[in-house]
Image: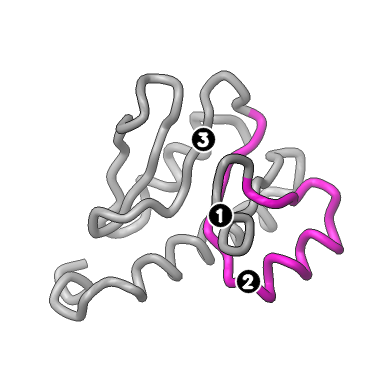
């Protein structure tokens, strides 16, 4: 997966938007105003995705390409290298999106 494929996949999620709140180097995807994925465009071989804490630990133990989130809360975020199989990358993105979406107020979720 490359950055453009990552971008297309994230923007395919209902209600997902792309923003650059940290400058033009960090591509950020949000749903309902909350971040679910960040990709540093200078280090565009990885992204940060939100993850349920117990699952995050399991994934880090299983895959060397998944590490604690760089510059993020390491309990809730993973850095995922895009050398993993596409199916596993999609699973990480989907999980992150769903965690954030499900945490939104009911009225916001209904609009999505």
Indicate the quadrant where residue 100 lies: bottom left
Q: Position of residue 32 (x, y in %)?
A: 24, 59
| Earlier residue among tags 1 and 3 | 3
Task: Give the residue pinned by disc 1.
Answer: 73
> In front: mark 3 or mark 2?
2
Q: Position of residue 71 (x, y in %)?
A: 57, 40
The disc label shown at residue 39, or none: 3
Q: Residue at x 43, y 69 (%)?
A: 98
Task: Give the residue pinned by disc 2.
Answer: 53
Indicate the quadrant where residue 31 lies: bottom left
> In front: mark 1 or mark 3?
1
Position of 92 with respect to 101 (left or right) is right
Q: Which residues are magenta?
A: 45-69
Q: Residue at x 64, y 53 (%)?
A: 78
Q: Residue at x 76, y 46 (%)?
A: 84
Quarter of the image that includes the N terminus: top right
The answer to the question of whether label 3 and label 2 lie on touching residues, with beta carbons closer than 8 A, is no
| 59 to 109, vertically: above or below | above
Q: SS for tag 3?
A: strand
Quarter of the image that includes the C terminus: bottom left
Instruction: Give the tally of numbered discs.
Output: 3
Q: Residue at x 44, y 37 (%)?
A: 7
Position of 15 with respect to 67 (left or right) is left
| 2 to 13, vertically: above or below | above
Label 2: how many residues lie within 10 Å, few (<14), some (14-19) or many (20+)? some
Q: SS for tag 1?
A: loop
Label 3: how many residues lie within 10 Å, few (<14), some (14-19) or many (20+)? many
User: How far apart are the two marked residues, 3 and 2, measured between alpha carbons?
Assistant: 20 Å
């Amino acid at each position: 997966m490359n950055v453009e494929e990552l971008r297309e996949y994230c923007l395919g999620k209902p209600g997902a938007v792309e923003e650059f709140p940290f400058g033009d180097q960090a591509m950020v995807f949000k749903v309902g105003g909350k971040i679910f994925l960040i990709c540093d465009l200078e280090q565009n071989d990885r992204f940060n995705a939100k993850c349920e804490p117990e699952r995050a630990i399991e994934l880090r133990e299983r895959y060397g390409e998944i590490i604690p989130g760089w510059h993020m809360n390491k309990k809730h975020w993973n850095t995922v290298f895009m050398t993993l199989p596409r199916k596993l990358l999609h699973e990480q993105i989907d999980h992150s999106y769903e965690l954030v979406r499900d945490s939104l107020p009911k009225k916001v979720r209904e609009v999505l």
